[in-house]
Image: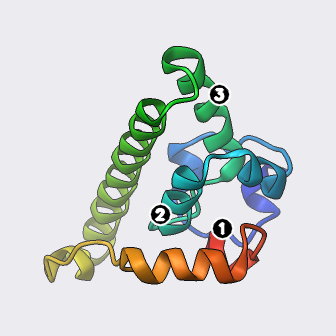
Amino acid sequence: MAAHDRSNERTLRHQVWRHYEGNAWDAFDQLPPRVRKRVTEHAYDAWSVNVLILWQHYKRVHGPTPRAEGALIRYLDYCERLERQVFAEHYAAEHGAPLPHDNARVEVLRAPAKAAARRTREAGSRNPASLM
């Protein structure tokens, strides 16, 4: 049984990305705070094991620096745009209309920086809700 069959995933993500197995909490905790914040703001579950694999790559390329964090965050933003495009195309083909979110021309909703920082401090990195 594939990983997506064991989860509540009901999207096309398993057709777009490879979901690496591993302990999601341990992977999330190994990410730098700035990257963890971005993962919690991702429009979809960014799969923290996958992000950790990417972080290890960016650290090899740039060293464990803010530059590496920024490069990874830009890549996560790119992946999010690709996912939204795939979902929008599928929705349009299935329903004959644009994805309502795109039709409304709204951005992905993200927590304001101060509110997100406060929630991170209050809840800690192991809060399950922070990954949704």
Given contact means CB atoms under 8 Å apart, are the residues at marks 3 and 2 in contact?
no
Mark 3 residue element: helix
Mark 2 or mark 1: whose residue is earlier in sequence? 1
Q: Residue at position x 66%, y 46% from top?
A: 31
Q: Quadrant of residue 95?
A: bottom left
Mark 3 or mark 1: whose residue is earlier in sequence? 1
Q: Percent position (x, y) of residue 98?
A: 19, 74
Q: Residue at position x 52%, y 53% from top?
A: 34
Between residue 132 and residue 68, name the one nearer to us: 68
Q: Amino acid at mark 3?
A: Gln
Image check: 115 left or right of 25? left
The residue labelled by disc 1 is: 9
Q: Colour scheme of this structure image?
A: rainbow
Q: CA distance from mark 3 to mark 2?
A: 19 Å
Given contact means CB atoms under 8 Å apart, are the residues at marks 2 and 1 in contact?
no
Mark 3 or mark 2: whose residue is earlier in sequence? 2
Q: Percent position (x, y) of residue 109?
A: 34, 78
The residue labelled by disc 2 is: 42
The residue labelled by disc 3 is: 56
